[in-house]
Each structure stands twice: as structure tokens, then as C-alpha cells.
Amino acid sequence: DLYNIRLIGADTKIHGVIGNPIGHSKSPHLYNAAFKSVCFNGIYLPLLVDNVANYISTFSSPDFVGYSYTIPHKEAGLKCCDEVDPIAQAIGAISCMIRKPTDGKLMGYNVDYLGAIGAIEEALQGSNGSPASGSPLAGKLFVVMGAGGAGKALAYGGYEKGARVVVANRTYEKAKELASKVGGEAMTLAELKEFHPEEGMILANTTSVGMKPRIHDTPLPKEALKHYSLVFDAIYTPKMTRLLTEAQESGATIVYGTEMFINQAFVQFERFTGFPAPKQLIRDVLARNT
Ligand code: ATR
């Protein structure tokens, strides 16, 4: 009973996740169960889409109110928006699109970074007690490995929270370009091995190094990890990467890539429905469907 068929009617608000492929997506399970739990009259569909612009112009009725965007359509989705929020514009990709009820305009957002940053902040608060005010990332040295879509999202997110951002990437030019936009320092992954101006730094991996099937690879050797107090890995297949295993052995707090997905789902749910996210229910549904 993925869909609440008895509820579907003329007032039902239609949502979906736009991607290709889309069959593996857990989002329909998550959002339909969450909509039902707060009695929100909405449905959420997996949408296998080839051409985003064609899709959006075809399904332009006001009932089609919210979309999530996934690979490979996050950039194409941005071009279909009437308005884009500044962070999504800077990242060059959206993860979420909402039709404004007042004038029907399509608004684009990127909440991927909020998911990752939110998970990191939550873990930092857990390890340091509650912060006096502001973000626990403020003032911290925040090292982002990778300068692709996810790297940009993390770097802008850290910058927005007042962290001192360092971008380390295999290809130096890309690190430099991103670092210059967030007022940070750039280096190669090789240089990062020797970089430890202070202890207690925060590390985020957004490269694909360590992802299945190459689970024995790691973007940063274990010797370097002792300088970090928290390590986040955006990879979630496997959940426990070699980087996270070695970070934990080195005494760092670790944050799983799955937390990024869960946290961005909370944010999207709240934007879609206006209700606070049923956080435990969302965690339970994801645990059941993995
Ligand atoms: P995403 O949208 O998930 O960020 P992406 O845009 O394809 O994916 O970016 C992949 C990132 O992983 C890049 O930073 C890439 O480094 P380059 O810019 O040098 O290509 C990094 N990456 C991929 N394979 C890598 C490898 N074997 N070693 C180091 N970095 C790697």
C-alpha cells in the first residue's frame, strides 16, 4: 500500500522524483508514508524522465506542485525554473522544485547541502553539548574533498555557516575555482595528506573514492585522519566506507552518507507540505526499504 488510493481526488497535490533511472528510488516509499502520517492530501511518484523541459511543459497543471530531482537531471531542472534560490544558482543544480500556489511560478532549491550540513551540525552538537548560538561549524576549518556537484554543495554550505573552507581535489584547477568562490584555500588530494595547520578539523568526502565496488580505496590515508575531530562521507554504498572505518579508529566522530539523504528529506517534506517532518517515521521507512 504505497499509495493512499482512497484519498486521491481532484484536490490531491501531485509530487514526484524526476530522474533516469528511477526504479531504485526510495523516495516514493518515504514521502507517501510521511504524507499519510500527517493526513496531507498528496501523492509522490517515481518519474522516469528523459527530457526535463518537455516533461515540465507537458505537466503544467497547478496540481503538479512539487518535484525532487536526482541524477542526471539536477542541472537541467535548474533551467526549467522561473526563479532559483542563490545557493542553487551558485551550485548550478537544483534538488527540489516547488510550484508557488499564488502565481504558479516554479521555484528551484538545492537542499542537498542542507542535508549534509545539517547532519554534520547535529553530530558536532552531540559531541560538544549544545552550542551557545549560531552554527557549530562557525570558525572551524572545514576540508571538502572533491569539487563536483556534491563538493560544491558542501563548500557553499560550510561557507554559509561561517566555516573556513579548504577544497582538496584530484584536479587542482577545479579545487581552485570552487575555493575562490567560497573565499577558501585550494590544494590537491596529495597535498592534503601533509596539511594539518591545526587539530580538530572537520573533513567531508564528496569524491567517489571508496564507493562500491572499490570499497578498499580511500581518498585520504589513515595517518592524516588523526588531525580531524569529525569525518563525513557522502558515499552511502557501502554505508561504512574505509575512510569512515579508519576515521573512527583514529578517534573521530563519523557521519554516514545516509544521514545526508535523511536530513534533506526532512527539509523537502517541510517545503512540500508545510508540516514539520515526522522524523522517526522517515527513518523507519528508510530502514525498512534498504
Ligand atoms: P558528484 O556530483 O557526486 O560530486 P562528480 O561531479 O562526478 O560527482 O564529481 C566527482 C568528484 O570525485 C570529483 O571531484 C572528482 O575529481 P576530479 O575533479 O579530479 O575528476 C573526484 N574523483 C572521482 N574519481 C576519483 C579518483 N579516482 N581519485 C580522486 N578523485 C576522484
Image (spheres, rainbow, N blue to C red):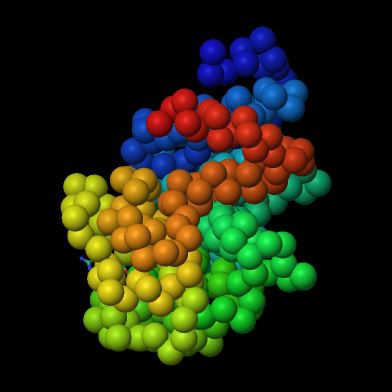
Figure quadrant of residue 8:
top right
Q: How many marks?
A: 0
In the foreground, 59 or 202: 202
Identify whether 3 is placed above or below 282.
Answer: above
Q: Residue at x 47, y 81 (%)?
A: 199
249 left or right, relative to 212:
right
Figure quadrant of residue 203:
bottom left
Identify whether 68 is placed above or below 14.
Answer: below
- Residue 208 pos. (x, y %): 29, 59
Identify whether 52 is placed above or below 278.
Answer: below
32 left or right, relative to 62:
left
178 left or right, relative to 103:
left
- Residue 185 pos. (x, y %): 44, 88
Q: Residue at x 67, y 28 (%)?
A: 35
Q: Residue at x 40, y 31 (%)?
A: 290
Q: Is residue 26 visible?
A: yes
- Residue 26 pos. (x, y %): 46, 33
- Residue 2 pos. (x, y %): 53, 18
As drawn, which residue projects farthest toward the top?
6
As drawn, which residue projects farthest toward the right?
102
In the foreground, 33 or 47: 33
Split into quadrants, the picture shows ligand 1 in the one at: bottom left
Identify whether 33 is placed above or below 119.
Answer: above
Q: Is residue 50 visible?
A: no
Q: Residue at x 63, y 34 (%)?
A: 280
Name the quadrant of the N terminus.
top right
